[in-house]
Image (tube, rainbow, N blue to C red):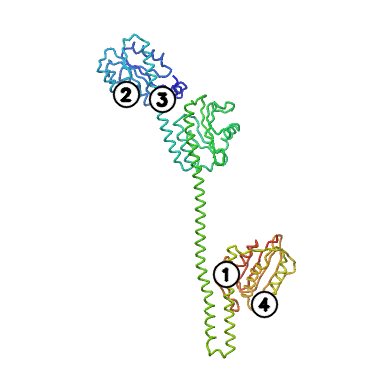
C-alpha cells in the first residue's frame, strides 16, 4: 500500500487507527481478531468487544484521544444493543470509519437499516467458509478507508494552501509575512524545531522577535554559526530548498532537516533561512516536501510584494516629505514676500512722500525768491532720493545673492591692500563725524576673493560702525590670520546691539531699525548682504557686542 498516510503510520509519525471486532461469541471474536492481525495488523490497533455498549465506549475513547477510527466489524444479534444500532451510533461520531456487518441470522431489514443510516460497506456471513474472500474483503475495506483519508488529506491540504496563500498575499510587512509562514507550516508537516534565522542586518525586517514553544524567529548570531559555511554557500548558490537527503556530507546534529533560503532579489542577497528539523532519520516524505515547496513558492511571491510595497512606501514617504518641505518653503517665501512688500511699500513711500512735499514747497512762488530755502529743500530732496536708490539697490543685491544668480569671481590678491583702499573711502565719514579711524594692516596677506563683492560686505559693516558711533568715538579695522582663514576685524565704540537681537542681526528686517547717532537712516539690509557675500566666499561672520560699549565684527575668509 503506497499511501503517504500509511507510510507515516509505519514510520511512527501518525498513530495507528482503530480496527474493532464486536461479537458476543468468543470463538468468532478471537478468529476475526487473529485474521485482522495477520492481514492488516501493522496498520491498525486491533481491539475486540463482546457487546455494542462496550464497543461504543472504545470508539468514544479513541476519538477523545484525537485518534482515528478506521474499521469496524460487528455482529448483528448480541445481548443489549444490536449490531445495526451500534453501527448507526458509531456512524454519528465516526462517519469515516468503514463498517462491516457479520450476519448469521440477521434479517434484511437490519442490513437495510445499517446501509441507510450507517453507510454500511459490506456484510459477511459468519458461516462463510471462504477465508480468502473474508480476507480480501477486509483488505479492500482497509484500502478504501486509507484512500478516503488521502482524498480528505489532499483536499484539506489544498484548502489550507489556498488560505495561506491569501494570507501571505495580504501581508504588508516582513514581520506579518514571517509570522504567517511559521504559523502555517505545522499544518503541512511536523517538526521538533522550526525557526527563521535572520542573516546580517536583517533584524530590521522585524519590529519584534516572536518566541513560541516550537515557532521562533531567531535573531541570535550564534544560531547562524551552528550552520556550516558549506550549507550557506550551497543555499546562496542554489537558491532552493535543501534537505539532509540531498546534502549528506554536512555534520549536523539533526537527523532530518530542511533549509529554505529567503532572498532579497532586489539586492540578490541571502536575508534569512527557514530551518526545520527533527531528531528522527528520513522523517520527511516527498509529499510533505512538495507541500512545503508550494508554500515557500507562495511565500517568495509574497516576499517580493512586501519588498516592493516597502520600497514604494519609502519612496512615497520621501516624496511626501519633500513635497511637505517644498510647500512649507513656498509658504515661507510667500509670507516673506508679503512682509517684503509691506516693508518696501513703507520704506519707499515715506521718502517719496517727503520728496513730493518738498517739491510742492519749491513750486510755491513765495519760496522761489528765497535761494537759501530752495537750496535747503533741494538738498533734502537729494538725500531722500539717495536713500530710495540705496534701498532699492540693497534689495536687488540681496535678491541676487539669495537666488544664487550673482556670480563670485575669486582671484588671488592682497586682502591687505583691499582693506587699505576701504579705509581711504571711509576717511571722509571719519572726518565728518569726528570719529577716529584706527587700523592694524601691517601684515601682507593674500587669499582668493571677489573684491567687488567683498567690498559690499565690508562697506555695509563699516557704514554701521560709523552710523552707530557718536562723535569722539573710535572705529578700528584690523587684519590677521590663522592656518585656515584671513580674519578681518571691524570694531567700534558705539551704542552696541541688545543681546536679544544678536542671534537675528543677519536676517532681513528681523531687527527693528534704529537711527544712527546723527539721525542717519538705514535700509535694514546691510548685514544680510554682508552675511550672504561672506557665505559665498566659504567664510562666516562672528559678532560680539555690549550695549553702551560697542560692537566687534570678525569676517573669516578662507586662505585656500
Q: Is residue 529 left or right of residue 173?
A: right
Q: Which residue is mark 1?
A: 395
Q: Which residue is mark 3?
A: 150
Q: Is residue 412 left or right of residue 522?
A: right
Tag 2 or tag 3, which sits nearer the N-term? 2
Tag 3 or tag 4, which sits nearer the N-term? 3
What is the spatial separation of the Cα atoms under label 4 and label 3, in whole angstroms? 108 Å
Residue 463 rendering spot, x and y as whole percentages: 63, 73
| Dot 4 alpha-carbon crowd within 10 angstroms: few under 14, some 14 to 19, many 20 or more | many
Asked if 113 appears above or below 494 in the picture, the reply is above
What is the spatial separation of the Cα atoms under label 1 and label 3, in whole angstroms? 87 Å
Q: Foreground mark, 3 or 2? A: 3
Specify the farthest residue to the top: 129
Asked if 400 appears above or below 125 in the picture, the reply is below
Tag 3 or tag 1, which sits nearer the N-term? 3
Disc 4 and disc 3 in contact, CB within 8 angstroms: no
Of residues 173 and 34, the one drawn nearer to the viewer in this rendering: 173
Asked if 373 appears above or below 177 in the picture, the reply is below
Q: Which residue is mark 4?
A: 430
Tag 4 or tag 1, which sits nearer the N-term? 1
Disc 1 and disc 2 in contact, CB within 8 angstroms: no
What is the spatial separation of the Cα atoms under label 1 and label 2, in whole angstroms? 98 Å
Numbered tag placed on residue 91 in the rendering: 2
Of residues 486 and 395, the one drawn nearer to the viewer in this rendering: 395
User: SS at mark 2?
Assistant: helix
User: SS at mark 4?
Assistant: helix
What is the spatial separation of the Cα atoms under label 3 and label 2, in whole angstroms? 20 Å
User: SS at mark 1?
Assistant: helix
| Dot 3 alpha-carbon crowd within 10 angstroms: few under 14, some 14 to 19, many 20 or more | some
Residue 354 rendering spot, x and y as whole percentages: 53, 80
What is the spatial separation of the Cα atoms under label 2 and label 4, in whole angstroms? 118 Å
Amino acid at each position: 500500500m503506497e499511501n503517504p498516510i500509511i507510510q507515516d503510520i509505519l514510520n511512527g509519525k501518525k498513530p495507528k487507527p482503530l480496527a474493532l471486532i464486536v461479537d458476543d461469541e468468543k470463538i468468532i471474536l478471537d478468529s476475526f481478531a487473529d485474521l485482522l492481525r495477520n492481514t492488516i495488523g501493522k496498520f491498525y490497533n486491533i481491539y475486540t468487544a463482546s457487546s455494542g455498549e462496550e464497543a461504543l465506549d472504545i470508539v468514544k475513547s479513541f476519538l477523545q484521544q484525537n485518534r482515528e477510527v478506521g474499521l469496524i466489524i460487528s455482529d448483528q444479534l448480541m445481548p443489549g444493543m444490536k449490531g445495526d444500532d451500534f453501527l448507526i451510533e458509531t456512524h454519528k461520531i465516526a462517519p469515516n470509519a468503514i463498517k462491516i456487518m457479520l450476519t448469521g441470522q440477521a434479517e434484511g431489514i437490519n442490513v437495510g437499516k445499517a446501509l441507510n443510516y450507517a453507510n454500511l460497506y459490506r456484510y459477511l456471513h459468519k458461516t462463510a467458509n471462504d477465508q480468502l474472500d473474508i480476507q480480501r474483503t477486509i483488505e479492500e475495506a482497509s484500502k478504501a478507508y486509507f484512500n478516503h483519508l488521502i482524498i480528505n488529506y489532499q483536499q484539506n491540504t489544498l484548502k489550507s494552501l489556498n488560505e495561506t496563500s491569501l494570507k501571505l498575499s495580504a501581508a504588508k510587512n516582513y514581520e506579518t509575512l514571517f509570522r504567517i509562514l511559521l504559523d502555517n507550516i505545522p499544518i503541512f508537516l511536523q517538526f521538533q524545531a522550526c525557526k527563521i534565522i535572520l542573516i546580517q542586518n536583517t533584524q530590521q525586517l522585524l519590529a519584534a522577535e516572536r518566541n513560541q514553544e516550537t515557532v521562533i524567529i531567531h535573531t541570535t548570531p550564534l544560531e547562524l554559526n551552528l550552520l556550516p559555511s558549506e550549507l550557506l554557500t550551497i543555499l546562496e548558490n542554489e537558491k532552493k530548498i535543501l534537505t539532509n537527503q540531498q546534502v549528506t556530507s554536512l555534520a549536523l546534529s539533526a537527523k532530518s532537516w530542511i533549509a529554505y533560503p529567503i532572498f532579497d532579489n532586489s539586492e540578490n542577497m541571502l536575508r534569512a533561512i527557514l530551518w526545520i528539523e527533527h531528531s528522527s532519520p528520513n522523517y520527511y516524505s516527498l509529499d510533505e516536501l512538495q507541500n512545503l515547496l508550494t508554500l515557500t513558492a507562495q511565500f517568495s511571491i509574497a516576499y517580493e510584494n512586501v519588498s516592493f510595497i516597502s520600497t514604494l512606501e519609502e519612496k512615497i514617504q520621501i516624496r511626501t516629505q519633500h513635497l511637505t518641505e517644498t510647500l512649507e518653503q513656498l509658504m515661507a517665501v510667500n509670507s516673506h514676500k508679503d512682509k517684503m512688500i509691506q516693508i518696501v511699500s513703507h520704506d519707499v513711500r515715506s521718502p517719496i512722500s517727503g520728496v513730493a512735499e518738498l517739491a510742492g514747497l519749491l513750486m510755491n512762488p513765495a519760496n522761489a525768491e528765497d535761494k537759501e530755502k530752495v537750496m535747503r529743500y533741494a538738498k533734502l530732496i537729494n538725500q531722500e532720493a539717495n536713500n530710495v536708490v540705496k534701498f532699492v539697490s540693497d534689495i536687488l543685491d540681496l535678491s541676487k545673492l539669495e537666488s544664487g544668480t550673482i556670480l563670485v569671481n575669486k582671484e588671488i590678491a592682497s586682502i591687505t591692500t583691499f582693506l587699505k583702499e576701504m579705509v581711504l573711502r571711509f576717511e571722509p565719514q571719519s572726518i565728518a563725524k569726528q570719529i577716529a579711524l584706527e587700523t592694524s594692516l601691517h601684515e601682507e596677506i593674500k587669499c582668493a576673493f571677489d573684491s567687488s563683492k567683498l567690498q559690499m560686505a565690508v562697506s555695509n559693516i563699516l557704514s554701521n560702525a560709523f552710523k552707530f558711533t557718536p562723535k569722539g568715538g573710535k572705529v578700528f579695522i584690523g587684519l590677521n590670520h590663522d592656518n585656515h582663514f584671513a580674519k578681518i576685524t571691524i570694531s567700534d565704540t558705539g551704542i552696541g546691539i541688545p543681546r536679544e537681537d544678536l542671534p537675528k542681526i543677519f536676517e532681513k528686517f528681523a531687527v527693528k531699525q534704529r537711527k544712527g547717532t546723527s539721525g542717519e537712516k538705514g535700509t535694514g539690509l546691510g548685514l544680510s548682504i554682508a552675511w550672504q557675500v561672506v557665505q559665498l566666499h566659504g567664510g562666516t561672520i562672528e559678532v560680539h557686542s555690549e550695549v553702551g560699549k560697542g560692537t566687534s565684527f570678525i569676517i573669516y575668509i578662507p586662505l585656500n
